[in-house]
Amino acid sequence: MPEELKDNDINALYQKLNAIAQTGLTFSKDVFDTERYETLRQIATELMASRFDIDRETLHHVSESGYATPKTDVRAFILRDGKLLMVREVADGLWSLPGGWADVGDTPSSAVCREVAEETGLQVKATKLLGVWDRNLHGHPPLPWHVYKLIFLCEEIGGSLTVNHETTSLGFFDINELPELSLTRIVAEELEVSMAIATSDRPTWFD
């Protein structure tokens, strides 16, 4: 009997099917091909909704147009006296690095600095790219999008710690005494590898 597909396999399969459908709908000129790609998108939606706690309406709204590419999530790695700044997310009450989606028109480094200012009140500058992580490969819960996570080492240059509408608490933590993580945003492996690179001359991690 074939081995049962794991959640991450199903998630990746959905992302690939949806990407094929999205790209096909963008470039197809034939009405019959368009119908086939719409059907493929519907099959992908049914697959995802049947396996995970994500309703079909939500999956319908995350569908995009144009050539399908991964989304970009940027996170800031900020150390103070050897401890790591983390924010408690309003969405789930759990902890993550400051950050979020990169906006169109942002450079990656300006995106992460903007996110830090919005979520923590601190002004920072990005000094090193610590890692580029494929979200599908490191134990995050399933998500409709394929995401690349960029983690930057950032240096404080001003401001003061302040919570906002996206965060309920801020704090600096020892890497060996982390709070409960918001796994949809960050996992322990990403933090541990980032700390090792931030405190040494090791090169940027990728994949």
Image: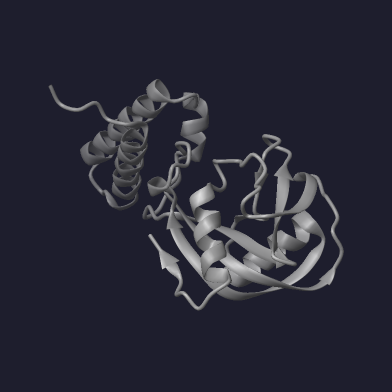
Residue 105 visible in the shown view: no
Give the residue displayed 38% in from the left and 52% down from the top.
68
Q: Position of residue 158 (x, y in %)?
A: 83, 73
Nearest the viewer among 52 and 63 is 52
Give the residue displayed 68% in from the left and 65% down from the top.
78
Give the residue displayed 38% in from the left and 48% down from the top.
137
Circle count = 0
Residue sitting farthest toward the left: 1
Give the residue displayed 54% in from the left and 41% down from the top.
184
Snapshot quadrant of residue 39: top left
Residue sitting farthest toward the front: 176
Nearest the viewer among 19 and 90 is 90
Nearest the viewer among 148 and 66 is 148
- Please tell me whether residue 26 is drawn above or below residue 47 in the rendered image: below
Lateral position of residue 155 relative to residue 185, left or right: right
Q: Position of residue 142 (x, y in %)?
A: 45, 36
Q: How is the image coloured?
A: one colour
Q: Position of residue 19 (x, y in %)?
A: 34, 46
Lateral position of residue 49 relative to residue 72, left or right: left
Nearest the viewer among 194 and 109 is 194
Q: Quadrant of the N terminus?
A: top left
Q: Position of residue 151 (x, y in %)?
A: 55, 63
Snapshot quadrant of residue 101: bottom right
Residue 116 visible in the shown view: yes
Snapshot quadrant of residue 6: top left
Q: Quadrant of the C terminus?
A: bottom left
